[in-house]
Image (cartoon, coloured by chain):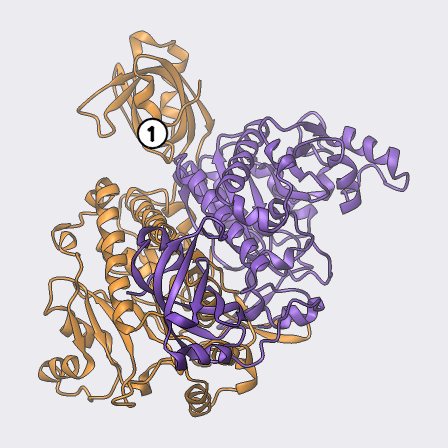
Chain colours: A purple, B orange
């Protein structure tokens, strides 16, 4: 009976079959070892000459790295083994003998690894990162589903831009032009009026012509929106959310984080409440260390690091200047040059992982903002309707999955946080 | 204290505040009724003249359909009320008086409703359909996450086509051209070799120039792939999966399905095992009732209905002619004109909801198939690598979410199964 390595614990003492790939193998005269991986785990299979048909035993040396192999044998508990079990092998069969596997323990350049991404994901560290990613995504959904939010997917094809037009992908959509979504935000405002508490979770696209360690062309974003929430409610929701996904992941993926060498001490401190800093205060902090910073500007990555380095957990910066935020942000009634926005900066230099805030609910103000941003009012008629038919205060945010995965894993570049990254100049494999 | 209608049960006897939209209101002299909806439920608020300040009571008639309103009052259990609770109102405030709401109980044409989709989703039946959709999506994820599958998202931007080139959307990707994914299939074959059991779940795109009730331009698909599974394992996984999502949804969304008038009798029968019919046998069934059908052809929607009408639950058709299926399908070794594919046809005329099968694992055969399909080998080098480095038998399938939602809800057209449908000629709102 073929079983998965992750299920070995239920088959101790039984004769079973494993199928997988040769991760590592070595010979030592009368005994040969094969570490098999099947994607769910690793298992050392031990071949003893005296116990195996000679022709089969001698064929062992035909195994190459990543050859697909079926092994039969008896499961044995082995506390010293990484997975806790070993297989006393009775026989094996090479399903396909792999050609010389291009990825070896030696150092490869990032371009080489990215060109071989379809094979690189088999390696232990990439495997660990992507398992953490899957856990974070499951945590995201459980958090919102468990609190009465309704998942309402936003469309990818959109007739208009919402986050500025400089980074838009477009496609011929029959006789029209469609843009690829940069955010589901506007659509979540419509579904919030129908379902109260909503979120969308899907890929978003920004044609950023920059090669940084924090940008992907195609990235996944979760965007909750809550009817009748204000800026302060929004920060409360965001901090509970981030605490939940971080604490759950470091518990459920302890093994993977250990493989990655992640120091989880700083992660244990990611507990609500998070500090809240007004933009003006944050700007003063930056100015002290970076005299070139202009108060009123948006923050660059080094500026964010200056702020986040002052705290032991993620920190909110709120009330950014209206001029640096999107048209739909509600302006502060006491000081319209500021808006009711909040970004969450992750510690350890990871920077912004959440952007959000309270939305403009006045039809009149929104029309003014759309004109100020040189956007086409006709494209936003449906969005304006939300202010005509029962306008309501509401707030929400977007969390970028890849930056969150990078932070939780403690890795430097977002390109390793998604199975097949799309980067400036990279659309393969 | 502002609370959600879904939480009323925890506040019986307490003075609370509700915020939402006027769903329905009527006056009867000294007593006025407002049914408020807040997205999480409906609550009747009762205003008695003798108990309320006169100016406030008289202002009631200013309320219009979909006006946003805040109401304070005391929660009262009321078994005759749909939600089980009512509010004895003390006061209310109109947050924004809605203009004349365009959607009324009278019949509207589909184009009008689709143009007002952002408002139409507030109506009871659309609300119910989209709640069923969210439940099905949660069920999909729980099924795979609970069985040790790893979610491995496929990219949307791809360098090549996999399901034929006639329905491709493309975009300028910096200096290259990128295609929008029609399926994550090929990528799941790579991640299956890294994680054993995998799935992806995201939007896919097909530029179909047809207006049918079963096609969307942008639709969500879940695609599991399992290393070392064959065609028969694949059908077992698919039937367990479909049983799980259907049975869970009819339990957890009984109220919504009732609102939709869905007869759940046929749904109760959706239990594994499902019948399995060989293509040749299915073709004979069709031929008897549709003499124009050519044996060897793919099935049209009416042909699928002929087959599915003969069974009381979903039915698999397997071993389709290789010529009508994608290049990556493994051919039957005994009869290479047939392939190891399986489609699942839903009952009640809903037709294909799953397509899948066992994949070709031989490098040589795959190269032949790529040439036969006039595809560019260079685009598939990474995919061919999966046959060079530990090739392995594997199988998987794709389930279309919108067709599944339509079937479970018993509605005729997929355009109502997604918040913002994209159809031939429609990219708004």
For image coordinates 29% across by 87% down, the residue present is B333
Residue B303 at what x, y percent from top left? Answer: 19, 77
**Farthest residue, direction right:** A291
Classify residue A230 by image quadrant: top right
For image coordinates 71% across by 66% down, the residue present is A107
Q: Is residue A379 above or below residue A66?
A: above
The residue nearer to you, when weighing B172 against B109, is B172
For image coordinates 35% across by 13% down, the residue present is B14
Viewer can see residue A115: yes
Q: Is residue B390 above or below residue B220?
A: below
Chain of the residue under label 1: B
Is residue B209 found left or right of B239 in the rendered image? right
Query: Crowding near pointer 1: few (<14 within 10 Å), some, many (20+)?
Result: some
Residue B23 at what x, y percent from top left? Answer: 33, 33
For image coordinates 54% across by 40% down, the residue present is A250
The residue nearer to you, when weighing A103 against B122, is A103
Is residue B409 found left or right of A332 in the rendered image? left
The residue nearer to you, when weighing A140 against B415, is A140
- The residue indicated by pointer 1 is B6
Residue B292 at what x, y percent from top left? Answer: 16, 88
Viewer can see residue A400: no
């Amino acid at each position: 009976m073929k079983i998965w390595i992750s299920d070995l614990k239920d088959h101790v003492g039984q004769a079973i079959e494993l199928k997988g790939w040769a991760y590592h193998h070595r010979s030592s005269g009368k005994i040969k070892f094969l570490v098999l991986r099947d994607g769910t785990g690793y298992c050392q299979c031990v071949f003893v000459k005296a116990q195996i048909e000679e022709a089969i035993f001698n064929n062992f040396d035909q195994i190459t790295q990543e050859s697909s192999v079926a092994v039969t044998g008896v499961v044995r508990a082995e506390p010293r083994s990484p997975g806790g079990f070993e297989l006393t092998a009775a026989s094996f069969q090479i399903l396909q003998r792999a050609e010389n596997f291009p990825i070896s323990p030696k150092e490869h350049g990032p371009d080489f690894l990215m060109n071989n991404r379809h094979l690189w994901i088999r390696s232990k560290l990439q495997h660990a990162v992507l398992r953490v990613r899957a856990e974070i995504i499951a945590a995201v959904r459980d958090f919102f589903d468990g609190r009465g939010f309704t998942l309402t997917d936003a469309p990818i094809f959109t007739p208009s831009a919402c986050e500025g037009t400089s980074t838009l992908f477009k496609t011929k959509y029959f006789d029209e032009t469609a843009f690829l979504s940069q955010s589901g935000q506007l659509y979540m405002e419509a579904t919030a009026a129908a379902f109260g508490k909503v979120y969308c979770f899907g890929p978003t696209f920004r044609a950023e012509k920059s090669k940084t360690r924090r940008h992907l062309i195609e990235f996944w974003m979760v965007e909750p929106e809550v009817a009748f929430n204000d800026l302060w409610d929004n920060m409360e929701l965001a901090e509970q959310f981030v605490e939940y996904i971080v604490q759950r992941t470091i518990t459920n993926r302890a093994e993977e984080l250990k493989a990655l060498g992640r120091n989880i001490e700083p992660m244990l401190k990611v507990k609500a409440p998070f500090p809240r800093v007004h933009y003006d205060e944050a700007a003063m902090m930056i100015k002290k260390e970076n005299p070139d910073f202009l108060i009123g500007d948006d923050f660059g990555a080094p500026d964010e690091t200056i702020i986040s380095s002052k705290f032991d957990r993620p920190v909110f910066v709120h009330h950014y200047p209206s001029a640096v935020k999107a048209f739909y942000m509600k302006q502060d009634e006491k000081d319209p040059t500021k808006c009711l926005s909040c970004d969450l900066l992750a510690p350890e230099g990871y920077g912004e992982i959440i952007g959000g805030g309270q939305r403009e609910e006045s039809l009149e103000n929104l029309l003014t903002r759309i004109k100020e941003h040189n956007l086409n009012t006709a494209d936003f008629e449906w969005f304006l309707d939300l202010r005509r038919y029962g306008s309501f205060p509401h707030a929400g945010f977007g969390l970028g999955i890849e930056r969150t995965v990078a932070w939780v894993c403690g890795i430097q570049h977002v390109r390793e946080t998604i199975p097949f990254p799309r980067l400036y100049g990279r659309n393969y494999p």
